[in-house]
């Protein structure tokens, strides 16, 4: 039975600068690597459970109680013939969508779910493969065995570690070669040159290049630094090289057989060998998507200035501080037992570098554009708008608009030629040669639709959730976890499932395509682990005064800056891109150069003036030039000799540099650790606002040549073992652990409340959790409208403070009340149905939300502050991604919602509404807003404003609330909210009903081994 007592922990990763020796963790890993037992091949006598009856004998302490799922399916490689068959007849390649149905069906089946039904909605994730489930077996090299199970999942074993990694590389390429190639070219800022010049490809590579521009020498330097990082780093480098041998071995095999993925034919590309530098580029993409926070100090500064302009300096600063919700004590926290981990608070106002009003302009990174390339004039449209006006409102809108690539008018296209079609068809079966035209234009909406790389200054859409319950509150006495990452929905997925077994490695789970030399989230013989995005502030904004090296007068176009009084040229980092029309992407020819400027204080993102003098604003990220370092932590996750204890897990997690919240269970214990390279800031500075780029205000011990600084020690990161339960949904981690500078969303209402309330309410009944009951809590939260659950009751309290006598208003209020009483769920009317229960109330809530915010806040805030705040944090994050408030004709939010993505209700103004309405109602509010906004603080006036906006919402048509898009006709509510598996290749899938749930999800409870 697990221990009930909490115990103190010792995290073995030392307090360090990035040049860390990691002495204790290196010793731990080295000892584990020297073990003679091949991981997963240990004798059954080492465990209290018997191994699964399989063709490969492995130890598994899960007792058949571990499950996982990753829609749509494991298979991500298809030949040109398979793509054509799919386009013509809808014939899906095997294992390309077999996990999509079970994933969707849980929406309507979770309420009455029983233990015997779990495997209808999840795969068994037991280690090994039953002989009856082996679909195929390959031995690509002596000592390597790859068994493919009936779900298409590879189970890789190697006699030696090198052979194991070879197998991982071979299997990874076998499952995801085309996606791997997309990822490496995106990471190098050359997606358009590889996959075509579609506007989506251009926007994606531009955003990536803004945050992670590297020369080839930079990429090589990161590989060299990794190899030099002690025993662990050297082992990772060796593993990578063996993995690459497997990747390139597969490439050689398919080239010899002329049997490579069909997308290469369509894009008119050949397959090039993968290199160490390519893996660094892929790691760039993963880090940009999920692994860093902060860098939005300039946007936050504009909100502060707008607040001061509206209320005066003193009250304006109070209002700005309240809106920041940096350390709001009403926020639900992952560590809820009072643990405190101070980080990110201001210690003074030294070195503040606030811009002159109206002077901020985004830097265009596109130069020398030709043809269909985004021209500098198009990319600078937002900046031109700022020059016309000088208000903080326009300025905030400019930053937000410029944080993503400019929209491009309808593109010129060139129709496929007969020569192109003949080239693609030459190796097709005779019956399909005439059908090659069916796949023309496959990438005309981009090769990676749905992938959203936030540029610097843009809030990262943190996804993923976790529910972990300790053994004292479970029926079995063993901890139970339901957790996983929300990484978006793609066909095939960016992630792939695998099992890897070899010396020092035993794990099953997921890894990003091209990085599957280790399982990144999953399970081992006696434990499981997962992550959610951490989003603490690990990037800061600095201002550097511009100059010209020839002594002439500087302007905002100058490319040199003062560094300790010396006029220093910026480093130019350039990537040339060009494209021509192909069968896959008919975009007419074009080209451009992507150019970023690097200083000793980070990458240049904006220009402005301060006191009339031209400056550049830079963003400095702690993981820049260290994209590969986290591999050491992932290596440790895969090693049972480290991971069999909660402290070993925390040691591994502390070696991951990206910002994540990590969770762990074994048969007796649970644990948590927040990873990331949290820089130590100079004393007396405020990390919420931009600072001058001077040695006095820079990060402690910052080295601009080594890209190192002093970081907070592992013990200062939120961490814990054996709390009664943990919940996480990209929320606040612990007391005093600050929301990152641009994150205004960690207030009294956050989507984690749905998980927290579900667990608390269940435990309040006296019941003990099982896997099925924890699944039910998760799925209830996944199908609940956060606004309806947490804010609508307050809105109705205000409205019902006086009886509603108008019949129209009474009907509308009745609809919302009934929906709220039923739990504010968004559920289909039946399994497979494409309509929602309570559809009218859901539409009304969607339409009302932006109107009620304008009615409640705009009069009291004034246009300047209201618009600046809209520009810094979107007002809504509904399932459809719509119903936003626009400023200056665009949706100028640095974290604007995506459509058809599943993940919802992360960013929005629900916390502001909650605090304001409770204040107007006379209810207790901790950390209240300094100003009562709704009705100017009058309950009756507030009620009138809400009712008027509700009636206005009811008059909006369904077509207005849910406009048409690529997938849906106007007014189709279910379709607008639905999830799209965005195609990364030639195979597409049906839309599925909305649910706010991890893409890859584990359900685990271990019976022994802890």
Image (cartoon, helix red, strand yellow):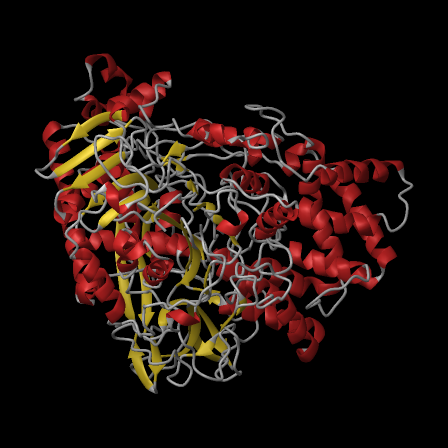
Single out the residue that lies furthest toward the top.
Answer: 431
Q: Nearer the viewer, residue 788 or 282?
A: 788
Image-based side of 420 in relation to 348, left or right: left
Tell me: 644 left or right of 480: left
Relative to residue 864, is residue 802 depicted above or below? above
Residue 142 in sight in this render: yes
In this rendering, would 169 be left or right of 512? Answer: left
Q: Position of residue 810 (x, y in %)?
A: 85, 38
Pick the residue in front: 34 or 302.
Answer: 34
Up-down relation of residue 147 to residue 353 (above or below): above
Depicted 9 relative to depicted 810: above or below = below
In terms of image quadrants, where is residue 840?
top right
Residue displayed at 52% across by 40% down? 770
Between 722 and 899, the one lying in front of the other is: 722
- In this view, the residue in front, 260 or 8, is 8
Question: On the image, which quarter does residue 651 sit in?
Answer: bottom left
Q: Residue furthest left?
A: 142
- Above or below for 312 versus 70: below
Q: Position of residue 562 (x, y in %)?
A: 35, 82
- Residue 216 appears in the picture as rendered: no
The image position of residue 471, as x and y in percent, is 49, 50
Position of 892 with respect to 139 (left or right) is right
**Residue 931 location (% of width, % of height):** 74, 68
Q: How many marks?
A: 0
């Amino acid at each position: 039975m697990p221990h009930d007592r909490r115990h103190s922990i010792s995290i073995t990763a030392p307090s360090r600068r990035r040049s860390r020796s990691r002495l204790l963790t290196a010793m731990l890993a080295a000892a584990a690597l020297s073990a003679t037992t091949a991981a997963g091949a240990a004798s059954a006598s080492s465990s209290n459970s018997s191994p699964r009856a399989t063709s490969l004998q492995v130890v598994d302490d899960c007792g058949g109680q571990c499950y996982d799922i990753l829609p749509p399916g494991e298979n991500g490689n298809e030949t040109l013939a398979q793509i054509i068959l799919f386009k013509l007849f809808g014939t899906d390649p095997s294992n390309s969508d077999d996990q999509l149905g079970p994933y969707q069906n849980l929406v309507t089946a979770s309420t009455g779910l029983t233990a015997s039904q779990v495997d209808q909605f999840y795969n068994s994730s037991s280690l090994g493969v039953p002989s009856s489930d082996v679909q195929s077996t390959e031995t690509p090299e002596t000592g390597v065995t790859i068994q493919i199970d009936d779900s298409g999942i590879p189970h890789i074993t190697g006699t030696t570690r090198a052979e194991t990694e070879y197998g991982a590389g071979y299997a990874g390429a076998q499952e995801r070669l085309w996606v791997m190639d997309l990822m490496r070219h995106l990471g190098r800022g050359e997606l358009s040159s590889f996959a075509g010049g579609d506007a989506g490809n251009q926007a994606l590579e531009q955003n990536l290049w803004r945050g992670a521009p590297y020369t080839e020498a930079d990429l090589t330097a990161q590989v060299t630094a990794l190899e030099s990082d002690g025993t662990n780093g050297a082992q990772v480098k060796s593993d990578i090289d063996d993995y690459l041998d497997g990747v390139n071995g597969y490439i050689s095999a398919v080239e010899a057989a002329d049997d490579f993925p069909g997308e290469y034919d369509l894009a008119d590309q050949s397959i090039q060998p993968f290199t160490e530098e390519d893996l660094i580029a892929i790691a760039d993409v993963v880090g940009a998507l999920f692994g860093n926070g902060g860098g939005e100090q300039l946007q936050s500064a504009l909100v502060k200035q707008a607040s001061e302009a509206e209320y005066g300096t003193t009250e304006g600063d109070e209002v700005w501080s309240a809106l920041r919700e940096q350390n709001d004590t009403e926020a639900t926290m992952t560590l809820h037992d009072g643990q405190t981990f101070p980080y990110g608070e201001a210690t003074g106002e030294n070195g503040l570098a606030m811009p002159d009003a109206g002077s901020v302009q985004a830097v265009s990174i596109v130069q020398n554009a030709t043809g269909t390339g985004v021209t500098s004039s198009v990319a600078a449209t937002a900046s031109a708008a700022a020059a016309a006006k000088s208000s903080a409102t326009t300025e905030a809108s400019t930053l937000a608009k410029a944080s993503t690539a400019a929209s491009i008018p309808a593109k010129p296209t060139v129709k496929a030629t007969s020569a192109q079609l003949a080239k693609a068809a030459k190796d097709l079966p005779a019956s399909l040669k005439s059908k090659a035209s069916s796949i023309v234009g496959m990438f005309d909406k981009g090769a990676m639709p749905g992938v959203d790389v936030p540029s610097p200054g843009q809030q990262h859409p943190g996804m993923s959730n976790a529910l972990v319950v300790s053994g004292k509150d479970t029926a079995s006495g063993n901890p139970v976890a339901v957790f996983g990452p929300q990484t978006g929905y793609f066909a095939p997925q960016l992630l792939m499932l695998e099992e890897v077994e070899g010396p020092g490695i035993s794990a099953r789970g997921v890894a990003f395509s091209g990085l599957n030399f280790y399982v990144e989230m999953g399970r081992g013989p006696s434990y499981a682990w997962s992550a959610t995005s951490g989003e603490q502030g690990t990037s800061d904004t600095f201002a550097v005064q511009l100059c010209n090296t020839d002594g002439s007068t500087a302007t905002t176009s100058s490319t040199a800056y003062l560094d300790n009084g010396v006029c220093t040229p910026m480093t130019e980092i350039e990537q040339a891109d060009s494209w021509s029309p192909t069968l896959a992407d008919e975009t007419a020819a074009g080209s451009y150069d992507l150019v970023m400027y690097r200083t000793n204080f980070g990458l240049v993102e904006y220009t402005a003036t301060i006191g009339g003098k031209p400056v550049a604003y830079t963003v400095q990220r702690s993981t820049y030039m260290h994209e590969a370092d986290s591999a050491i932590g992932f290596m440790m996750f895969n090693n049972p000799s480290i991971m069999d204890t909660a402290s070993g897990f925390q040691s591994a997690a502390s070696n991951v540099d990206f910002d994540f919240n990590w969770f762990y269970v074994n048969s007796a214990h649970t644990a948590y650790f927040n990873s990331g390279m949290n820089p130590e800031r100079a004393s007396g500075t405020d990390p919420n606002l931009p600072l001058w780029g001077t040695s006095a205000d820079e990060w402690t011990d910052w080295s601009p040549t080594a890209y190192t600084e002093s970081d907070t020690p592992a013990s200062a990161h939120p961490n814990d073992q054996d709390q009664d339960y943990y919940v996480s949904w990209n929320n606040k981690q612990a007391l005093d652990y600050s929301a990152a500078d641009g994150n205004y969303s960690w207030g009294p209402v956050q989507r984690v409340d749905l998980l927290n309330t579900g667990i608390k309410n269940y435990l309040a009944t006296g019941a003990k959790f099982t896997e099925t009951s924890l699944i039910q809590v998760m799925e209830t939260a996944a199908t609940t409208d956060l606004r309806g659950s947490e804010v609508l009751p307050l809105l109705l309290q205000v409205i019902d403070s006086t009886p509603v006598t108008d019949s129209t208003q009474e009907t509308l209020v009745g609809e919302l009340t009934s929906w709220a009483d039923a739990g504010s769920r968004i559920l289909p009317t039946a399994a497979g149905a494409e309509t929602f229960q309570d559809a009218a109330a859901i539409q009304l809530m969607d339409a009302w939300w932006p109107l009620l915010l304008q009615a409640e806040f705009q009069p009291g805030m004034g246009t300047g502050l209201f618009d600046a705040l809209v520009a810094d944090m979107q007002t809504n994050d509904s399932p459809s991604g719509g119903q936003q408030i626009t400023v200056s004709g665009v949706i100028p939010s640095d974290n604007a919602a995506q459509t058809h993505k599943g993940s919802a209700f992360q960013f929005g103004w629900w916390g502001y509404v909650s605090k304001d309405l409770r204040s107007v109602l006379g209810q207790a509010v901790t950390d209240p807003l300094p100003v009562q906004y709704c009705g100017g603080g009058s309950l009756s006036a507030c009620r009138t404003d809400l009712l008027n906006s509700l009636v206005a919402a009811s008059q909006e048509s369904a077509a207005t609330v849910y406009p048409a898009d690529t997938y849906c006709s106007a007014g189709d509510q279910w379709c607008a909210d639905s999830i799209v598996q965005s195609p990364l290749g030639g195979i597409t899938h049906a839309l599925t009903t909305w649910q706010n749930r991890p893409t890859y999800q584990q359900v685990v409870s271990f019976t022994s081994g802890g």
